[in-house]
Image (cartoon, rainbow, N blue to C red):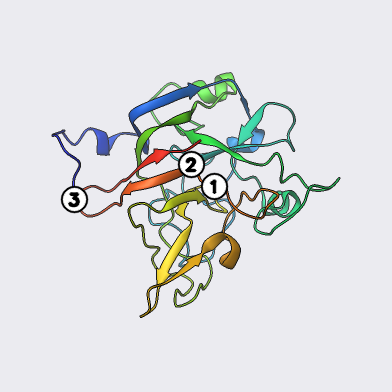
Amino acid sequence: MAMLGQASGGFTESSSALRLLHVGIRNTNAVLTLDSFTQTNPPIITTAGTISANVDTSVLGVLSGSVAISRPDEGSNYVGGPGSSTLIAASGGGTASTASATSLPQGYVPLGLFINNAVGNAYENTPGPASGLGPYVSAMGTYASQLFETEAFVAVGALAQGDDLSYIPGVPLITSLNGYLMPSRVWTGAANASYDLVTTALQSAVLNSAGVSTTVAILRMPADSTQPEIVFDQRI
């Protein structure tokens, strides 16, 4: 379905995947990590058949609508994407972990959603590379985004690797290993069984010390052929 009201095609033709409906805080306090401008997309899970249909693989750097993650590996007051698979393993992402001298799960957490692509867009000014900053929205708000995971990374219950993920109104959205939004649970099989993607499939990049992923948002409206965006209330 479409949201209430009318609009031209302008918002769906924007160079930004994230659309601000009721904005919280436009945060520019943190400095972008170096890999925020160089990461490939998707940065971690690149297996054929598991890549989101909504990701432009030709664009480098963190993307509009991707999750801004605190990056203590880079230093104090840094924010970026998920980094490398080596960093995720060291920081406790993808597996339950406790703080130690070699892991950073306490500080590797989602902060909000990036408003624009870090590297900018063709025929536009590029304030990100010039300033080293990447604005992200934090402190609640309501948003729509055309960037989210669409395929399962691994098999979960009756869900096979490469199957479509289901977005159901009310489901919590978390951070995928690629740093994109994804549902925290899937419903599969004849019995409509529910599986937690954090504890069962370990598909989340950001796990806290309790081995669960931080809820980034609550889904209000899934994408469909009428409106190719998910609409959600942010929780961070």
Circle on res. 179: 1
Q: Earlier in the sequence, mark 1 or mark 2?
A: 2
What distance separates the C-alpha of mark 3 from that of mark 1?
A: 27 Å
What's the amino acid at mark 2?
Answer: Ser
Residue under the image location 50 percent in, 49 percent down? 174
What distance separates the C-alpha of mark 3 from that of mark 2?
A: 24 Å
What distance separates the C-alpha of mark 1 from that of mark 2?
A: 6 Å
Label 2 near label 1: C-beta < 8 Å?
A: yes
**3 vs 2, front mark:** 3
In the image, is residue 41 above or below residue 95?
A: above
Residue receiving disc 2: 66
Q: Looking at this view, is 121 or 203 the one in front?
A: 203
In the image, is residue 43 above or below residue 155?
A: above
Residue under the image location 39 percent in, 24 percent down? 124
- 101 left or right of 115? right
Image location (x, y in percent) of residue 194: 45, 68
Element marked by disc 2? loop
Residue 127 visible from this viewpoint: yes
Image location (x, y in percent) of residue 212: 61, 54
Residue receiving disc 3: 1
Q: Quadrant of residue 167?
A: bottom left
**3 vs 1, front mark:** 3
Q: Quadrant of residue 144?
A: top left
What's the amino acid at mark 1?
Answer: Gly
Label 1 near label 3: C-beta < 8 Å?
A: no
Image location (x, y in percent) of residue 88: 68, 51
Residue 126 visible from this viewpoint: no
Q: Residues within 10 Å of mark 2 (few under 14, many from 20)?
A: many
